[in-house]
């Protein structure tokens, strides 16, 4: 690969090519370091946890050692319970998130374009989001039942807000020259939205989605805790009912791992979609 | 005024009203006719309203007073019949050079093979082959400008509105682009309004040059600059040099006026503030 | 007149509520008519409960939110600019995001007990997510040339953060704070629901457990209304702050 | 200078049912209040957070149910927890017992009919829940195998039953008095039938705390007894109903039952029934909610309440 | 190389590495010395790496190979000793014209009254009085550029790095600004690197002109252009015209090469893709 590159810039001096090689190596090292450093700080956290839990300053009830929690997770995984719960929770969280993402972007886009839609939804969103939806649990159960539909609805209702506001804020910041440019080349209003305004607002919209994702996961788990049923939240709730600290912390760790993976995936998508953007350029 | 004009600008004013601060009268009572297939250059001091005038003809800003008629129809909205090269390029930062150029062609529902071919031809024309897949943020200033030119030329509008399109190009590339533009203009029936700061360029390219006054912009003079032949030696001919000097003097007056208007405004402002 | 018109949708919503309850589309013990909720609200105000509990809640909420904005915003901005911080701290932050904060109560009480402290911490942690993400992404996207510009005029790194990175991150950061503002109300209630002696969440949980849903919804709507008012005021503030955009 | 009064925090979950929830309303009867101690009732969403709070010295007197006491001792490792007094009991002859109800014209005629159905509970492992599971097990039905258990708050139970979202609900005070429920539903069995007399909820504190503040605690219990007596006194019935009304934002007419025989049984000396408690604890273990049983006598300290009762005489 | 040079650029390469796509070698083995108080112009075809070179001297991009020494110290970071006028202005969009200009002065802890006075003086100098409170989005292209110039001149750096600073100005304003720049340069001890596409401008302003080759940029030639007197008739003198022609030819060669390199790359690429 280096050879090919040297040929590409065959006008470049040999020294440049050599410098290139050493820079490439440095970059690779750097990437390895970054990945490694992430794991490093997590390791430090876990070790600190273990030491603190064993120090005698806290009881195993308040903070069980990490090793005990890991054992518990392992047992749950072998028993299959972990996977069943994981699947249920992920299904609810991700379905809810997907609906919130699509619906939120669509609603934001329509609100930005149509004054009537904006007039209608603007106050409703401002009232609806800070509303403590837990209080409506009985009605939600009565209307939407006890199972996935009601839980997913709660997830959607909580996760859609950051998406809508981010879409609105992003669209408000689009440079007018870009819109003009699109119009000039004959884009219809619809095309302008899809091909100019939304891509230009994409960085902000993605930020909204990045915020919505952990919210979706949290709400899915809280809904499970409040309404019972399977899932990581349900498992954590029953563990907590029986003062089973290991079970509670096993749940916390499992959720953290799952959430971490989802957030990383989302960040990767962001990097892919925003190759053109400042933020993906090399940092100096 | 007459059925012959391609673009009629009639007693147009434009005032910018920033959300805060006082309104700015950018254009005052501007009237200008552009004939079909004409190449008209627009000269004027910085801030006199040249870009504003192009935006109005492009249909990006609403005509508040007066009227602008293009091909017999009053301008109400932008359309692909009027292609514009923006002073600040306005490239889509999320699209590569090629995708930026393809965009207008896609909007015209041109068949895929045809538009790929056409986009490549214009990439080659502006000397950007090898950078088809670069994003605007990865281009130099001149390369961005050339992408913007290629993008607008590619979708082949009847009317070209160009706002200092060669401002960021080196002398040689600029000369090349001038030639290409003239070729295209001669080959296909296009009406061009061309904003430039380079008086020589204006005289060399245009058939008529309109000189605008300092803000608020007015059309101060319109000078015929049609030369019979456009040979390389032209720019050294006496005729040519004389036209350049004439225009240069007109522009200079305005620029000086602009400076003194400002100085005066300043004077007026001082005691009150 | 204009104001009433622009809040007409809420009126429609209220009418729909009243109708649903009156027509018994849903068991009226689960959803009392809005008019009864209104009466209960008057009672709660007269009795002083709403005001007392509200004051306690608003204190917790505003302290938690303030900490989230300062801490989360600062963290996001710093992570975006200082590579080392990004590399070492970001994984921990990302690990923290998806945790339902109420599950952390056993841990948070270790340090802060069950009093105001643990609730403020909960609100702080929850509200931090959108603020940090917004600040981080906004700061990462700031125009290099502007950063360079400030540096070349003699701004040191810290100064440059404040003068360039913060303003360019502002649109995203402000939107993150808007989300945090709304989240604060939700988190407030859910943290107070678990255990407390006063606060909106206490009132909701308490009235709910006695089955006096009129009162409970009156409190819920009060929270929603306060959230709404805060959001409106905040939006005016954003508009003023971003007045340089065209 | 005098020592600062001891701060005693007491927990409660259900208003009216738990004495702590109405304690402060009759603070005027508490002669030692502010002298040797101050009392601060705190509301908890359920008993599990109480365990955490007690473990963390954030709560002095917990309001543990018979089903959560074993959890506190075993799982939370608080071997030093001591039952110090009664709060209320269920299934005492002549007093109310929690009821488990089905729709009158519904498909459930006997317990066996619940196979494959949905059953509501307030919270897994709570006293009511344990009793219900015990009854169903007696009839050969196991949770999650033969029927589905879902959780719902007590006030919402009626609607869930009426809308046929669930087939069996626990009806507790005051919700069992709902006229609509009375019209449409009837009892399938009650808690007494399920587990007999039960020491439902009792006040519990940790031994080191008891030992350190014995005198103040006796003062507190003495005042508590005074307050309880006031509430139980039929003379004060109307005033009590008024207090209940103020607390719950509901008309006083609805509280005719309060502190009467239509209410749960409260021992007028706040004396817990340890025999019943022992049986309850054993049964909780048999149902699998606790790993081992223990001697409740070893985990109670009734000397305080006895001393307080003596003083009143 | 010698203690006398103000800026030493020694065998510097620069490669851009976009997150995706192949790396672009923008500068290859560039060496250049600039003497104290020298006015050096930089000419070269579009995309040859002129801006990149200024960024390196400014300390914005890291020097990967070779070294850059300014006033005896290797460049590691940007500093207020080196002021830069960016090709795309880089004004703070959230600050008004005045606030943009004040910014650098505030950073220097200049007393308030003094900096207000100084900012106003430079606003007047670039002819923007009356627009002190406008935001950049409310200015025309040329006005933005003038704000950027004023901003950098105001805080009075020892070294001026200017990237096509007059590109968006009309001929007359440009001439005015040239004169002002020369005045400032003569009055205060400044070293200037001035990127331009206008060969005449380069010869008129600079003492030496460096011509860069097409990408990857190299220094192709350095031409002395010091004239004894800078009278208005200068630009018509034979000497001057000859220099312009000489440089013009050098640049032309490179521009043509740039075009053909691209065409060739294109050729090579085609079959493989
Ligand atoms: N968005 C805006 N808000 C307020 N004023 C504006 C706005 N855009 C332009 N102006 C003002 O209108 C006048 C004309 O601007 P315009 O951009 O048309 O000038 P121009 O002739 O193109 O100048 P240049 O040659 O410098 O590009 C200027 O004085 C400018 O300050
Ligand atoms: N961020 C970037 N990523 C990748 N390539 C870049 C980047 N910036 C510049 N380049 C490439 O580096 C080369 C030199 O760019 P530079 O901006 O220095 O040119 P320039 O001489 O200033 O040109 P112009 O006169 O057009 O402004 C160009 O070929 C450009 O494509
Ligand atoms: Mg302009
Ligand atoms: Mg450049």
Image: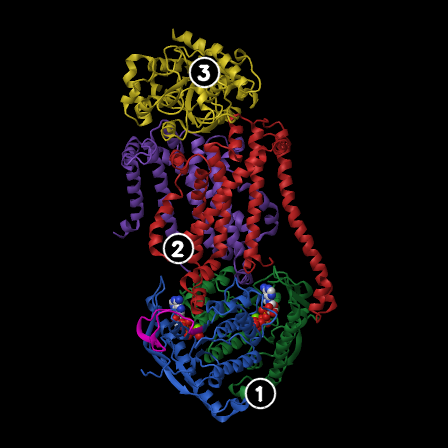
Chain colours: A red, B blue, C purple, D yellow, E green
- What is the distance, in whole Å, between disc 2 and disc 3 at their CAs? 59 Å
Q: Position of residue E178 (x, y in %)?
A: 51, 78
Q: Which residues are magenta?
A: B61-83
- What is the distance, in whole Å, between disc 3 and disc 1 at their CAs? 112 Å
- Secondary structure type for disc 2: helix
Q: Residue at x 51, y 16 (%)?
A: D283
Q: Residue at x 28, y 39 (%)?
A: C19
Q: Quadrant of residue C28?
A: top left
Name the one closer to the observer, A97 or C62. A97
Classify mark 3: residues with Cα within 10 Å, few (<14), some (14-19) or many (20+): many
Name the one closer to the observer, C168 or A79. A79
Quadrant placement of the C terminus of chain B = bottom left
Q: Position of residue A19 (x, y in %)?
A: 72, 63
From the image, state whether disc 3 or disc 1 is nearer to you: 3
> Quick check: B74 above or below A128?
below
Classify mark 1: residues with Cα within 10 Å, few (<14), some (14-19) or many (20+): some
The answer to whether residue C246 is seen in the rendering is no
- Secondary structure type for disc 1: helix
- Find disc 3 in the rendering and name its residue: D194
Residue C217 is tagged as none
Is residue B68 found inside the magenta-colored segment of the image? yes
Q: Residue at x 51, y 60 (%)?
A: E107
- Find disc 1 in the rendering and name its residue: E241
């Amino acid at each position: 690969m280096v050879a090919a590159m040297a040929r590409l810039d065959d006008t470049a001096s040999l020294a440049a090519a050599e410098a290139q090689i050493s820079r490439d190596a440095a970059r690779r090292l750097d990437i390895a370091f970054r990945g490694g450093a992430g794991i490093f700080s997590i390791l430090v956290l876990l070790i600190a946890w273990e030491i603190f839990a064993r120090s005698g300053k806290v009881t195993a009830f308040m903070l069980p050692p990490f090793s005990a929690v890991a054992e518990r997770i392992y047992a749950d995984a072998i028993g299959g319970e972990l996977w069943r719960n994981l699947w249920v929770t992920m299904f609810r969280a991700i379905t809810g998130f997907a609906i919130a993402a699509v619906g939120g972007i669509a609603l934001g886009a329509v609100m930005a374009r149509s004054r009537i839609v904006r007039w209608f939804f603007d106050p409703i969103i401002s009232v609806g989001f800070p509303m403590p939806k837990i209080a409506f649990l009985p009605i939600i159960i009565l209307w939407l039942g006890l199972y996935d539909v009601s839980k997913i609805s709660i997830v959607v209702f909580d996760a859609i807000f950051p998406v809508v506001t981010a879409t609105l804020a992003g669209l408000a910041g689009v440079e007018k020259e870009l819109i003009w440019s699109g119009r000039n080349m004959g884009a219809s209003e619809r095309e302008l939205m899809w091909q100019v305004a939304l891509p230009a607002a994409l960085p902000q919209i993605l930020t909204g989605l990045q915020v919505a994702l952990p919210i979706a996961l949290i709400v899915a788990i809280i809904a499970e805790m409040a309404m019972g049923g399977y899932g990581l939240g349900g498992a954590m709730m029953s563990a907590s009912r029986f003062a089973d600290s290991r079970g509670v912390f096993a749940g916390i760790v499992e959720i953290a791992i799952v959430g971490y993976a989802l957030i990383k995936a989302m960040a990767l998508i962001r990097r892919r979609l925003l190759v053109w953007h400042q933020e993906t350029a090399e940092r100096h | 005024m007459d059925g012959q004009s391609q673009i009629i600008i009639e007693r147009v004013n434009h005032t910018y009203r920033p959300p805060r601060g006082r309104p700015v009268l950018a254009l005052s009572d501007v009237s200008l006719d552009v004939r079909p297939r004409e190449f008209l250059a627009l000269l004027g001091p910085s801030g006199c309203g040249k870009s504003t005038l192009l935006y109005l003809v492009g249909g990006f800003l609403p005509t508040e007073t007066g009227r602008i008629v293009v091909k017999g129809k009053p301008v109400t909205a932008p359309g692909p019949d009027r292609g514009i090269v923006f002073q600040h390029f306005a490239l889509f930062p999320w699209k590569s050079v090629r995708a930026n150029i393809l965009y207008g062609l896609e909007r015209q529902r041109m068949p895929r093979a045809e538009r790929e071919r056409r986009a490549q031809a214009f990439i080659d024309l502006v000397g950007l082959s090898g950078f088809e897949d670069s994003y605007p943020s990865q281009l130099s200033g001149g390369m961005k400008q050339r992408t913007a030119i290629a993008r607008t030329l590619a979708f082949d509008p009847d009317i070209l509105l160009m706002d200092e399109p060669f401002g960021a190009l080196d002398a040689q590339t600029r000369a090349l682009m001038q030639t290409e533009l003239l070729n295209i203009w001669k080959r296909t029936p296009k009406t061009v309004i061309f904003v430039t700061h380079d008086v020589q360029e204006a005289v060399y390219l245009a058939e008529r040059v309109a000189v605008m006054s300092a803000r608020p912009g007015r059309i101060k003079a319109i000078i015929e600059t049609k030369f019979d032949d456009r040979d390389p030696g032209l720019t050294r001919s006496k005729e040519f040099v004389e036209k350049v000097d004439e225009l240069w003097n007109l522009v200079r007056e305005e620029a000086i006026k602009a400076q003194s208007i400002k100085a005066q405004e300043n004077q007026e402002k001082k005691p009150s503030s | 007149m204009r104001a009433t018109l622009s809040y007409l949708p809420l009126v429609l919503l209220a009418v729909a509520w009243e109708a649903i309850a009156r027509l018994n589309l849903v068991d009226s013990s689960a959803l009392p008519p809005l008019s009864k909720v209104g009466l209960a609200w008057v009672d709660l105000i007269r009795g002083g409960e709403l005001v007392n509990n509200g004051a306690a809640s608003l204190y917790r909420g505003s302290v938690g939110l303030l900490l989230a904005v300062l801490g989360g915003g600062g963290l996001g901005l710093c992570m975006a600019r200082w590579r080392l911080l990004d590399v070492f701290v970001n994984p921990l932050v990302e690990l923290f995001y998806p945790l339902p904060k109420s599950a952390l109560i056993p841990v948070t009480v270790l340090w802060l007990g069950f009093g105001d402290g643990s609730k403020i911490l909960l609100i702080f942690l929850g509200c931090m997510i959108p603020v940090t993400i917004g600040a981080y992404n906004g700061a990462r996207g700031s125009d290099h040339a502007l950063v360079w510009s400030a540096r070349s005029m003699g701004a040191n790194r810290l100064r440059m953060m404040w003068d360039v990175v913060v303003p360019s991150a502002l649109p995203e950061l402000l939107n993150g704070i808007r989300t945090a503002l709304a989240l604060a109300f939700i988190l407030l209630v859910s943290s107070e629901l678990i255990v407390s002696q006063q606060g909106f969440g206490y009132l909701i949980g308490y009235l709910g457990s006695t089955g006096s849903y009129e009162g409970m919804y009156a409190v819920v709507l009060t929270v929603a209304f306060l959230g709404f008012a805060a959001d409106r005021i905040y939006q005016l503030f954003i508009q003023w702050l971003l007045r340089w955009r065209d | 200078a005098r020592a600062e009064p001891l701060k005693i925090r007491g927990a409660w979950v259900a208003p009216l049912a738990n004495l702590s929830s109405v304690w402060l309303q009759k603070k005027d009867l508490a002669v030692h209040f502010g002298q040797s101690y101050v009392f601060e009732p705190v509301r908890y969403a359920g008993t599990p957070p109480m365990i955490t709070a007690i473990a963390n010295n954030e709560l002095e007197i917990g309001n543990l149910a018979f089903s959560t006491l074993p959890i506190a001792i075993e799982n939370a490792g608080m071997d030093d927890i001591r039952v110090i007094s009664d709060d209320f009991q269920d299934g005492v002859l002549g007093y109310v017992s929690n009821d488990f109800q089905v729709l009158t014209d519904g498909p459930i005629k006997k317990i066996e009919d619940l196979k494959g159905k949905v059953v509501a509970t307030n919270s897994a492992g709570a006293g009511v829940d344990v009793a219900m599971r015990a009854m169903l097990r007696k009839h050969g039905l196991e949770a999650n195998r033969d029927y589905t258990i879902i959780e719902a708050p007590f006030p919402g139970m009626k609607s869930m039953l009426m809308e046929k979202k669930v087939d069996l609900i626990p009806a507790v005070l005051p919700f069992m008095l709902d006229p609509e429920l009375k019209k449409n539903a009837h009892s399938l069995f009650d808690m007494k039938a399920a587990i007999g007399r039960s020491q439902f909820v009792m006040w519990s504190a940790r031994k080191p705390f008891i030992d350190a503040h014995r005198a103040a605690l006796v003062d507190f219990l003495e005042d508590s007894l005074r307050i309880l007596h006031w509430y139980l006194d039929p003379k004060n019935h109307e005033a009590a109903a008024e207090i209940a009304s103020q607390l719950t934002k509901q008309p006083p007419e609805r509280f005719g039952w309060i502190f009467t025989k239509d209410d749960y049984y409260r021992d007028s000396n706040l004396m817990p029934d340890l025999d019943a408690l022992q049986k309850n604890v054993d049964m909780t273990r048999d149902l699998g909610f606790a790993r081992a049983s223990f001697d409740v006598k070893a985990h109670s300290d009734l000397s305080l309440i006895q001393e307080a009762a003596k003083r009143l005489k």
